[in-house]
Amino acid sequence: MKQNFTQIENILIKDNGITDSEFRTYLVLRSYKYGELGEVYPSQKRISLDRGLTSRSIISHVKSLASKGYIKYSRRGYNLTNLYEFGGEEIFTSIVKSASLSHRRNLHSKNTELNNTNTKNRVARSQIIEEIRKKHSFLQKNRTLSNT
């Protein structure tokens, strides 16, 4: 028995901006793509059966995937299936740039958060050290007074 397979861009596998469920819906859509054909037109009912989800969930995933630039879709007419097109090289290039910018922003905010935490820890440590010094100084004064 011949096994079919679906090729997928690595950027999609590593993209944290797409949910697991959206990713699986994208994979189902891509599974209908044969050869160099850049468009497919499965029905929402067919996609929902393949995914085991409601049509409403599929519609939500499709809209989200389109807003993120992974696919384009258009209605073909009354009582006809939608036409789904997959992003070309330029779309994935913009997604990579967007993802790397988002990644850099996340790193920056995490670094800022870490720096703030480190500063707070240093301040707390110096306050504790100061308290210990005061107590130590107080104890030494009391020892000196009790020895005399």
Image: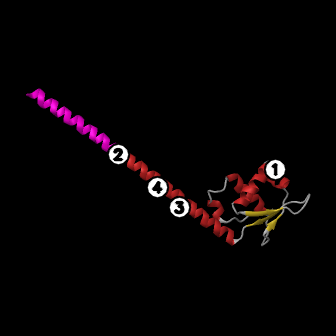
Residue 67, picture quadrant: bottom right
Q: Magenta segment, principal secondary structure?
A: helix
Q: In the rendered image, which quarter contains the C terminus? A: top left
Mark 4 is on which residue type?
Answer: Asn
Task: Identify the mark nearer the N-term, 4 or 2.
Answer: 4
Residue at the spot of label 1: 55
Residue at the spot of label 4: 111
Residue 87, picture quadrant: bottom right
Q: Is mark 2 on a helix, strand or loop?
A: helix
40 part of magenta stretch? no
Q: Residue at x 26, y 38 (%)?
A: 132
Distance from disc 4 to disc 3, alpha carbons, whole Å, reads: 10 Å
Task: Identify the mark nearer the N-term, 3 or 2.
Answer: 3
Distance from disc 1 to disc 3, alpha carbons, whole Å, reads: 36 Å
Residue at the spot of label 3: 104
Name the image colouring: secondary structure
Q: Can residue 52 be seen in this view?
A: no
Q: Can residue 87 be seen in this view?
A: yes
Mark 3 is on which residue type?
Answer: Arg
Q: In the rendered image, which quarter contains the N terminus? A: bottom right
Q: What element carries label 4?
A: helix
| Disc ID at residue 123 | 2
Q: Give the range drawn in magenta.
A: 124-148
Instruction: State the residue in front, 101 or 22.
Output: 101
Q: Disc 1 or disc 3, which is closer to the eye?
A: 3
Task: Identify the mark nearer the N-term, 4 or 1.
Answer: 1
Distance from disc 2 to disc 1, alpha carbons, whole Å, reads: 56 Å
CB-based contact (under 8 Å), mark 4 and mark 3 = no
Q: In the current view of this chain or complex, which residue is farthest to the left?
A: 148
Q: What element carries label 3?
A: helix
